[in-house]
Amino acid sequence: MNTHDTAAGAAPEGELLAARGLAKSFGPTTALHNASFDIDPGEMVAVMGASGSGKTTLLHCLGGMLHPDRGRIHYRGRDLTALSESQRSGLRREEFGFLFQSGGLVPELSCLENTALPLRLNGVRRKSAHRSAEEWLERLGVDGTAHQRPGEVSGGEYQRIGLARALITEPAILFADEPTGAVDSLNEEKVMRLLVDAARRSSTAVVLVTHEARVAAYADREVTVRDGRTRDLVQGGAE
C-alpha cells in the first residue's frame, strides 16, 4: 500500500508502520529532509541509496533508535515520536528485531546464548529460551555452532546466527541494515533466502537497507533515498 499523499502526522489505516515528514540533522549536516515511509504487515521493503544518502538514519528513526527532529512515525496506531525512551526500548525488545552488517553478537557468549539473549532480556526462563534458540539455529542450518563463540564461526554462519537472534522473538518488523555486506556472494544468496523464508513464516515485515540491487530484488517494493528524501518504486519480489 502506497499512501504518500496522506497528510503529515496521520497514520494511514491498515498499515503496520508509517512515517511522514521526517527530518533529522547532525550538527550542520542534514541526514533526512521531509522523508516518508510505510510498510504493511508481512511486507518486505528495500531501502536503497548511496553512502551518506540518509538510508541508515531513516532505518534508525523507524526502529526507534533515533528521534527525528521533525515528523511523525506511527506504529500500530501509536506515535513513536511521542513515546519515552523506556517505551521505545520496550518496543525494540519485544516487537522489533534488528540485524546489522556487523552482526553485533556478544563475543563472550556462545552462539546459543547470543541467540537466546533477546528472550532472556524479556524475562523468559533460561531453559525455555535456550530451547527456542536451538530450534532457530537448526531452522537456519547453524545448529552445529551452538556451543562455539562468535569468533569461531564463518562469516556466513555469523550472519545466520544474527538472523536467528533477530527473529527469535517473532517480531512484527525486522530492521536489517546491509545484512549481507560482510559475506561473499554465495553466502549473500543463502542469507537472503533464509531471511525471506523465515520472515514469511513468521509474518514479519522487513525493512531492508542495502546498496546492492541483487539484494533489493528479494523485496516486494523499493524505496530510494537521495539527499535525505525518499522516493517509492513498485517492483516484483523474488520468488
Image: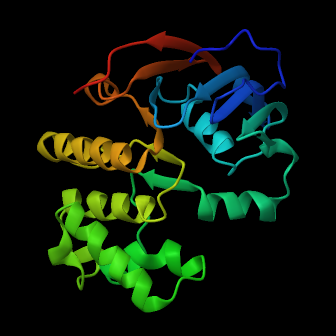
Determine whether 231 is above or below 84 in the image: above
- Is residue 226 or residue 88 the one in the foreground? 88
Percent x, y for residue 62? 65, 40
- Horizontal arrangement in the rendering, residue 81 relative to residue 156 (left or right): right
- Horizontal arrangement in the rendering, residue 134 relative to residue 12 (left or right): left
The outermost residue toward the front is 14
The quadrant holding residue 81 is top right
Q: Residue at x 63, y 25 (%)?
A: 37
The number of discs equals 0
Q: Residue at x 56, y 38 (%)?
A: 56
Q: Residue at x 46, y 37 (%)?
A: 42
- Horizontal arrangement in the rendering, residue 107 relative to residue 153 (left or right): right
- Is residue 105 or residue 82 the one in the foreground? 82
Viewer can see residue 204: yes
Percent x, y for residue 125? 51, 89
Percent x, y for residue 31? 68, 30
Determine whether 82 is above or below 44 in the image: below
The quadrant holding residue 14 is top right
Q: Residue at x 46, y 32 (%)?
A: 43
- Horizontal arrangement in the rendering, residue 113 relative to residue 187 (left or right): right
Percent x, y for residue 223? 51, 20
The outermost residue toward the left is 186
The quadrant holding residue 86 is bottom right
Viewer can see residue 184: no
Quarter containing the N terminus: top right
